[in-house]
Image: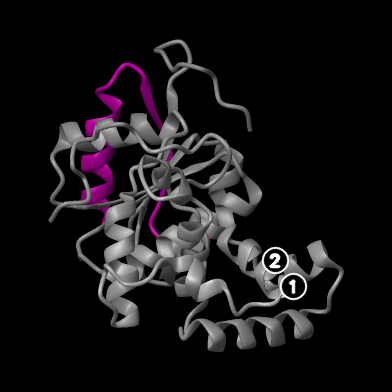
């Protein structure tokens, strides 16, 4: 799904809302529909409803609650993006949850904000994500990664942690960093799903981590030199680059 260079009242940003609280959906819809360049094209209160309805609406941005009665917004984000690679997902949650943030990153979400966000900042976030940029802060992800590994943030660079991997393990780690599943990695590399799983188990052990999302964050960080360029490491796809400045949506 190609995105126009700019959105306008004639070609508004198409937004799909997913939240199990009707009051929240109505409030967000009223807020966004008040903007001339944004059009809420539909909503859903459950994961099943979102997956059944979302693709037909052809949204540019999906605003997703992290917790749903029959699943979670992170899984919905991952599935919707597998069907619509150009979709930008903004995770909206009441909880400041580090684990959910990392899961959202690996599902390809372009932003993660708390429901306490100001209305004007939410509008800005939707416009930013619709333009193909990311609201994710690399510094925050680095802090989370260090916390999960129990390490000092100033520890040795990620490349050192990857030095013990075989070429095949590095290749698989890179694909994990792109958000591919074991099955997708197997198809890409012409390997069985079981073989991929075995490779992943070994590389996780070598990296000293337990979860694939931890390994994937290491991969994205190691793939980008230190400095401003790290911002691109969290983007999902060729057009996702972090804005030079933003409304501070990761705070809270």
Q: Position of residue 221 (x, y in %)?
A: 45, 58
Which residue position holds label 1? 168
- How dense is the environment of label 1, judged by Cα within 10 Å: few (below 14), some, or many (20 and up)? few
Look at the numbered disc 2 and give the secondary structure of its residue.
helix
Q: Position of residue 145 (x, y in %)?
A: 35, 70
With 91 as the anchor, is 62 left or right in this view? right
Which residue position holds label 2? 171
Q: Residue at x 44, y 51 (%)?
A: 234
Q: Position of residue 212 (x, y in %)?
A: 52, 76
Instruction: Please say whether residue 20 is visible from this viewpoint.
Output: no
Q: Residue at x 16, y 36 (%)?
A: 119
- How dense is the environment of label 2, judged by Cα within 10 Å: few (below 14), some, or many (20 and up)? some
Q: Residue at x 80, y 62 (%)?
A: 188
Label 2 close to label 1 by CB (< 8 Å): yes
Look at the numbered disc 1 and give the secondary structure of its residue.
helix
What is the residue that sits farthest to the right in this orientation? 190
Which residues lie in the magenta part?
20-48
Residue 32 versus residue 197: which sits nearer the camera? 197
């Amino acid at each position: 799904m190609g995105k126009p260079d700019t959105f306008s009242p004639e070609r508004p940003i198409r937004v799909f809302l997913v939240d199990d609280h009707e009051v929240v959906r109505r409030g967000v819809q009223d807020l966004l529909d008040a903007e001339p360049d944004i059009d809420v094209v539909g909503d859903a209160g459950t994961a099943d409803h979102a997956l059944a309805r979302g693709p037909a609406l052809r949204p540019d941005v999906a605003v997703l609650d992290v917790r749903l009665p029959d699943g979670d917004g992170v899984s919905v984000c991952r599935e919707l993006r597998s069907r619509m690679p150009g979709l930008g997902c903004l995770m909206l949650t009441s909880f400041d949850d580090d684990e959910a943030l990392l899961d959202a990153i690996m599902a390809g979400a372009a932003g993660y904000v708390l429901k306490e966000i100001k209305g004007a900042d939410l509008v800005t976030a939707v416009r930013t994500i619709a333009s193909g940029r990311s609201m994710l802060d690399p510094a925050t992800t680095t802090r989370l990664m260090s916390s999960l590994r129990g390490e000092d943030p100033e520890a040795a660079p990620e490349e050192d942690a990857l030095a013990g991997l075989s070429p095949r393990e590095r290749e698989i780690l890179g694909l994990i960093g792109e958000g591919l599943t074991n099955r997708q990695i197997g198809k890409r590399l012409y390997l069985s799903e079981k073989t991929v799983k075995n490779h992943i188990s070994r590389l996780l052990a070598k990296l000293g981590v337990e979860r694939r999302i931890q390994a994937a964050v290491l991969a994205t960080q190691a793939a980008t030199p230190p400095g401003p360029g790290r911002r691109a490491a969290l983007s999902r796809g060729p057009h996702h680059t972090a804005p030079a400045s933003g409304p501070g949506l990761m705070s809270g």
